[in-house]
Image (tube, helix red, strand yellow):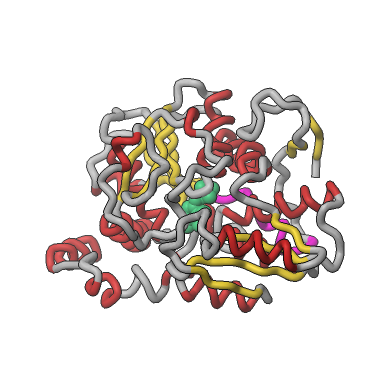
Amino acid sequence: MADHVMSCSCAAAPGCMVHRHREPQPEPAVLDSILDHIGNTPLVRLSRIAAAEGLQCELLAKCEYFNAGGSVKDRIARRILEEAEVDGRLTPGATVIEATSGNTGIGLALACAVKGYRCIITLPEKMSQEKVDVLRALGAQIIRTPTEAAWDSPESHISVAKRLHKEIPNSIILGQYDSPYNPIAHYDGTAEEILRSCDGRLDMLVVGAGTGGTLSGIARKIKERCPTCVVVGVDPVGSILAQPESLNQATSGMYYVEGIGYDFIPDTLDRSLVDRWIKITDKPSFTMARRLIRLEGLLCGGSSGGAVWAAVQAARELGPGKRVVTLLPDSVRNYMSRFLNDDWMKARGFLDADDEIREQRERN
Ligand code: PMP
């Protein structure tokens, strides 16, 4: 892997000289381990959704669920873990502890399984049983925390992870909420792949934000290479990441879409890179995820539906010859008993008679 320290403009410290950067590498014919199957994900044209929505521009989606652990977070999990190894902060026999909405946990548990570290994941109750089952299968120990706990309360998944770190000798929190290597993994990898696939030309980028690493890392590189590209952030109603603040006032409290939105602004989210925010809600997000599966054969998760729904709204103002890129962070594997299930959808008012008629029409 080509590693070098270079003058960087990463989200952690603009203009700093200290962060190691990596050139993207092609995947070898035979992999040393499945960790080498992270990155180089496909960029797919959403022609059927674009036609159904009457869009004139081209709509492309980076399918991150093809990564080894099934999500975009495999990229940062591998990166923050390997940077800690290089720095000597992570040594054999150590315990890796992380607070996560699930996908970073799966990426870390996968890396820990391959490399032989113990792994403890703190996870809010809201997150799906499917994520818990995958984490367990990968050998992680899981601690569930109350979803309603504020991020800085002692019961939150973040505070519980910090407490365990103090209690467990030779443990480490790799820290997706503040590690510069979270956005750098996307600045070095995901963004380079998108630019390469698009011959350096895109007009709009639409990406959801949780820690904001994906959005900030990709946006920073794309603004450098393609300054006219408009960056759109996607944030659920009930979260406070969007700007201006007035967008965040219509809170509906709890939302079901997993992995995006927070009640604090993570250090890894650089909102100065975002030109515009779009708020999303559960029903259109899940409806779009089901349409992506049915119309495009893309077996994605709920936040993917939210990102594509937002991309469609933003893309309406773009004419022929323009190109919008969005990103599908994870797979329907995480939500088999949730939005994929008609009864689950109906019980929450996300699938009514009109939706069923439209689904029927689109099926035929
Ligand atoms: N979608 C899903 C399903 C996720 O798990 C995450 C990670 N929390 C995101 C989107 C957002 O990614 P990021 O943390 O890089 O903002």
Q: Is residue 239 left or right of residue 8?
A: left
Instruction: Please indicate whether residue 254 sits to the left or right of residue 355 in the image.
Output: right
- Give the image location of residue 354, x and y in percent: 13, 63
Position of 203 relative to 343 (above/below): above
Tell me, yes or no, if residue 68 can be seen here: no
Residue 349, given in percent of the width and then of the height, sits at: 20, 67
Report how many numbered discs are placed on residues in the image: 0
Displayed quadrant of residue 91: bottom right
What residue appears at the point 30 percent right and 74 percent down from the top-left corner?
344
Residue bounds of the magenta highlight = 32-41
- Taking the spot 37% from the left edge, 71% from the top edge, the residue there is 338
Outermost residue on the front side: it is 154
Q: Which quadrant would residue 303 be assigned to in this image?
A: bottom left
Q: Residue at x 22, y 72 (%)?
A: 346
The answer to whether residue 4 is seen in the rendering is yes
Q: Quadrant of the C terminus?
A: bottom left
Residue at position x 32%, y 55% in the image? 285
In terms of depth relative to the viewer, which is nearer, 166 or 126?
166
Between residues 330 and 26, which one lies in front from this camera angle? Answer: 330
Up the image or down, 117 lies above or below 302; here it is below
Taking the magenta stretch, the answer to whether it contains residue 246 is no
Q: Is residue 36 magenta?
A: yes
Question: Where is the N terminus found, in terms of image quarters?
Answer: top right
Q: Tell whether 359 sits left or right of 45.
A: left
Q: Is residue 294 left or right of residue 98?
A: left
From the image, give the main secondary structure of the stretch colored magenta: loop
**Residue 114 position (above or below residue 181):** below
Residue 192 pos. (x, y %): 61, 36
Horizontal and vertical percent for residue 240? 39, 44
